[in-house]
Image: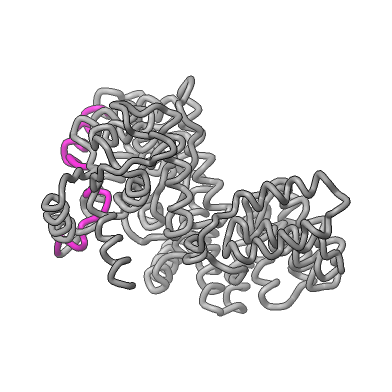
Amino acid sequence: MGAIKTIFFSILITGFVVHPVQRAHSGLFSRASMTTEEERELGKEFMFYVKRRFPLIEDPSIVNYVKKLGQHIVAQHPSPPFEFDFYVIDEDVYNAFAGPAGHIFINSGLIAAMESEEELAGILAHEIAHVLCRHISERIEQSKKIGFVTLVGVLAGIFLGGSPAATGAITSGSIAAGQSLALQYSREDERQADQVGLKYLTKAGYGGEGLLRVLEKIRGKQWFGSEQIPSYLSTHPAVEERMAYLDTWIETHPEWSKSGKWQDSRDFQKVRAKLIGLYGDTDTARNIFDAALRNDPKDAIAYYGKGLLLDREGKKEEAKQSLKRAVRLLPLDADILRDLGRVYFHMGDYGSALKLLRGALAFDSKDPEGRFFLGRAQMNTGDLQGAIETFKALHVESPDYLPGTYYLGEAYGKLGNLPEAHYYLGMYYKEKGPSKNARFHLKRALKMFAKDPQRQRAIEEALKDLPNSKKSDDKSKGAGGF
């Protein structure tokens, strides 16, 4: 990392560094208060920045599950001020935070440390409450005038954590240069977020014990110096006070003292196993699954997680056997069938892959991963028209699942339909980068669709959305890893 980039990211973990420069064309943040519309604008810029610089997990079965749970909690509010969205960051550290305008983030390491859906619901409800209470906009208002570009970058880095020593050093430099403001919730903010979060948590069918257990785990995580302090504790103060409050609340609300109705949901257990098996430390993951199987040799979810881990390690035959055991124990589970089909696909046994993937889709016809690997298997067996139909259905139902968009372009190319091939490849690179690839394919498609005004308008709009600079290409990814 270059010196300038190092300094920039050091500033990110500090907090708000105040500059007198304003975003000239918008006038945002020039008044004493931030409207919901201004926060939405900030949220859009914030997400543009985050998606290009931080490792978001895009696995549909993981992300869609967290979104479904989060939206269930948000739905208990009669008129939320924002359209909430939920993201999982691929970081093996304990952290969760709310970005501006209802963008909620939780780290994979924190979910992996949980034992029940009620724990995940508790932490999501707390972060949702920070947004509903407008705590972020209040902190921004207190920063007086701040440059928009600086604000977006700082917001994106603040909640990623940093040692107090490093933060203190940068803060000293910032104060010497002018003013600074660290975005750390106050005790009052935390208390209010717990109170409001519990209100909607109980409406959603959960108790407060899950949130209490998560806080106990975060507090109990061992560290040996300031560098290891859980990031969550750096931005969410007064954890002991919060735990005492929650303990009292649980005692005085016996009707909610028992576990929530979804606490032991299989979906949560599968998502946790997938996060551990595919994204966690491999040695730790192996120990977790082996210990679970020693405790219960018929633990289907442990076989499932271990199969995913073995596949990740390239041990395809062992992965297949572990997943087949999981299927025997849970023969109607679409996720396990799909992932066994995916292993057969990676082994080159496309006939078995097709059979299993079609079986999985019979139970969950809109599963993005199932459709994606079915289309891949169809391509590899020469059924290009079938693959196109599969990828088109995937694109309609799950347009944000970009690997499907890429391979739809590939399938059209193999079939000789170059206008459609360039169009879908251009749309893939428009979202994923690099922008020069997007521009190349979209301009080719524009010429080839000369007699299709509707498609030309769509392509022209896509070209307008492309950034003019090369900055967006710095962190872009190709189509590898599918």
- Residue 290 in the image: above or below residue 135: below
Residue 145 screen position, x and y as percent? 27, 37
Give left or right: position of 337 versus 265.
right
Residue 296 screen position, x and y as percent? 46, 61
Majority SS type along the magenta span? helix
Q: Residue at x 54, y 40 (%)?
A: 68
- Residue 169 in the image: above or below residue 317: above
Residue 325 highlighted magenta (yes or no): no
Q: Residue at x 69, y 62 (%)?
A: 406
- Residue 99 in the image: above or below residue 218: above
Give left or right: position of 130 versus 63.
left
Residue 244 highlighted magenta (yes or no): yes
Q: Is residue 310 visible?
A: yes
Closest to the observer, 69 or 90 = 90
Q: Is residue 246 visible?
A: no
- Give the residue furthest to the front: 24
Closest to the observer, 460 or 69 = 460
- The C terminus - image quarter: bottom right
Span shown in magenta: 225-249
Q: Which image quadrant is residue 93 in?
A: bottom left
> Number of labelled discs?
0
Closest to the observer, 196 or 37 = 37
Q: Residue at x 42, y 55 (%)?
A: 89
Q: Which image quadrant is residue 99 in?
A: top left
- The N terminus - image quarter: bottom left
